[in-house]
Amino acid sequence: DINADKRLDAAELQSFSKESFALPNFFASDLPSFGLRAGVEVLPNGSLSIEEVLRAKPMEYFPELLRKEPHRKERFSQQVWVDHAKSPVVETLLRRTGKVMNLPEEVIKRAEPLQVVRYPKLGHYSCHHDSSPDKIEAQQIRFATMGVLLNDVALGGETAFPAA
């Protein structure tokens, strides 16, 4: 209850769902269906009392929502990590990347494994940082990201670096 009014609106429920379930995509338009679980009719711009929220059983609702609509997750993709020391193809790719980016060979040799990601329809990765404070303390900083797209799409497919 961010504003201490003993009621939760869609923004407050979104904050809860993001922190508790890694579900940042709870919208005002979801509020009516969530309210119905508590037997309450609520408009998208409305709110629910704390008691009504508890009656709606959020600890069941949000995991169920993620199972039914996995594209609402913070990240909706499949990925695998490939160790460059075990793959001549990846080793060659990293060496060429180092040349293009004018990086010393020592930096390339210390690169983390290559992350290969596949995004299905509605796939995405919400805005995030590639290096977290614990990784920085361990001197594991990803200071560059290279993206190689293996297909093109008629609509969507954007990549943005808002803090760059």
Image (cartoon, grey):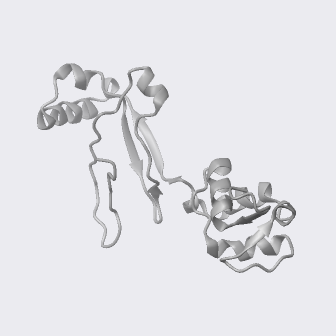
The quarter of the picture where the N terminus appears is bottom right
Quadrant position of residue 14: bottom right
Q: Is residue 79 left or right of residue 33?
A: left
Quadrant position of residue 29: bottom right
The location of residue 79, given as percent across then percent down, is: 45, 44
Quadrant position of residue 8: bottom right
The location of residue 110, given as percent across then percent down, is: 30, 22
Location of residue 24 with respect to 81 vertically, above or below: below
Q: Is residue 89 left or right of residue 71?
A: left
Q: Is residue 111 left or right of residue 30?
A: left
Residue in the picture at 34% in, 33% down: 142
Residue in the picture at 42% in, 42% down: 129
Residue in the picture at 68% in, 54% down: 16
The location of residue 36, given as percent across then percent down, is: 80, 75
**The one of 18 and 125 positioned closer to us in this rendering:** 18
> How many discs appear?
0
The location of residue 138, given as percent across then percent down, is: 43, 20
Location of residue 104 with respect to 159 vertically, above or below: above
**The one of 159 and 111 positioned closer to us in this rendering:** 159
Furthest-front residue in view? 4
Residue in the picture at 32% in, 51% down: 161
